[in-house]
Amino acid sequence: MKTKTKIVEYHLEASAFSWEISSGKTIEAWGFNKQVPGPELRAKAGDTVIVKLTNNLSEQTLIHWHGIRLAAGMDGTDAVQKPILPGETFEYRFIVPDAGTFWYHSHANETVQMEKGMYGALIVEDTADEIITDAERVFIIDDMKLDANGAFTKPRWFIPRVVERHDGRQGNTLLINGKENPTIQMLAGQRERWRFINASSAHYFDLNLAGKEFSIVGTDGGLLESPRPVRSQLITPGERFDIIVGPFEEGDIVFMESLAYNRMTFLKPRREKFATIQVGHRAPSIAQVPNTLRAIPQLAAFHAEINRRIVLSVGPSLKDGMDFLINGSVHVNDKPVKVGELQVWEIVNASLMDHPFHLHGFFFQVLEENGKQPDFASWKDTINLKPRSATKIAWMPDNRPGTWMYHCHILEHHQAGMMANFEVVADGMPVREIMSHAHKHHH
Ligand code: C2O
Ligand code: CU
């Protein structure tokens, strides 16, 4: 151990409240500590994080710590814990082993609870991170589907319901950090680190900063090996990207936009503005971004033998128009995996639309996509699967037995069946989860 680890404690209260998304425009949100997003939680790699969650909603809830390699019992799904009922408090406690941009969100009735604002950032700092920038910001991407009165709407008729089930709930109100088209002040000549988290139900966000170059330095599982200069970056629901932006010129006005991305929905893809960056006077910079960030050892060879094949598809349903399937079924129990046995999975997207695939609790590496090796190594927990594609991933079940899950992070698809639970077992024997006890106080 190089540094002392400590305990970082937070208290979150889930409740309904009104939230101003832009001046004079207020919505009835659900969220944590009466803000959208919820409070930004921060810790250093190796710290123990304790979060006491009090549920003051009118319905049960759970929190999932998206991307954290924690014990199964703390993963916040209904497979590993009892739902937290209104009035109850539950204590989440886990070590954050990896530095990176993570997030937390409701994992109960997600299409309602997340849509209304139940998410926030969890930033884990690296004690040895050598990236120095003039400022750091977290941007959480979201959209909400609101009517003219600012109320959340649900489609009533069959066809619009099928469209929402198919496309996912794509909103008409675009938000960055809970605000509509916020203005961000930045100084000329400076370089900043921006951490993006896509918390939307289904919105594909293809980041564009007026066509200016920026560098990707991190993904879901922390830093890349070296910065990657790009001019746009697709960030799908659940994914995170850390980028270095700037320097910009004094007086620049830069729109933070999403380019039109066609994910094969009924809705037509459009270019959309999410925020406006205003560049002020010139200031000195202390920014230093090394060319070597870290080494990412390769988990498996590109041609490693596949030991599991998962097929995502869309099938007809009389009641709802269509179901979203894993290996031909909805809400699946997949075969167990053994601790210490390298997993090489081929994930086939047999459908005609994109799906962001998320694995809980473990990072994976992409070995190939449609037979092609990726250009650079990275650790991921969420990856976009293009229509009619096959993506080969590798991951290692370390010694954290219990029930885990994978699913499409388009919330409506997850709800419509595109998910599976599976066990991580030690020595081939399922290990019973140690249920953590809810601390109940009633109000
Ligand atoms: Cu961020 Cu089960 O999801
Ligand atoms: Cu999907």
Image (cartoon, rainbow, N blue to C red):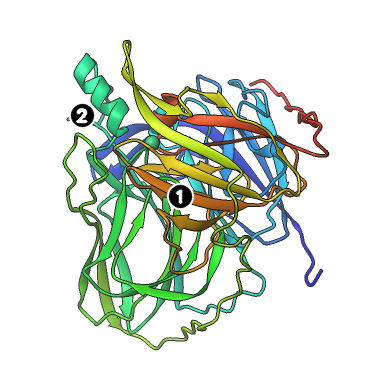
Residue at the location (29% across, 56% down)?
206
Q: Quadrant of the C terminus?
A: top right
**Mark 1 within 8 Å of ligand 2, using the beta carbon:** no
Q: Secondary structure at mark 1?
A: strand
Please determine whether, in this image, residue 18 is positioned above or below residue 253.
above
Quarter of the image where one finds residue 208: bottom left
- In this rendered view, identify the residue nearer to me: 200 or 359: 359
- Disc 1 target residue: 391
Amino acid residing under circle 1: Thr
Q: Secondary structure at mark 2?
A: loop
Please determine whether, in this image, residue 128 is positioned above or below residue 276.
below
Distance in Å between CA atoms under marks 2 and 1 = 39 Å
Please determine whether, in this image, residue 326 is positioned above or below residue 44.
above
Q: Residues within 10 Å of mark 2 (few under 14, many from 20)?
A: few
Q: How many marks?
A: 2
Residue at the location (20% across, 76% down)?
252
Q: Earlier in the sequence, mark 2 or mark 1?
A: 2
The x, y position of residue 48, in whole percent, is 73, 52
Q: Quadrant of the N terminus?
A: bottom right
Q: Is residue 185 visible?
A: yes
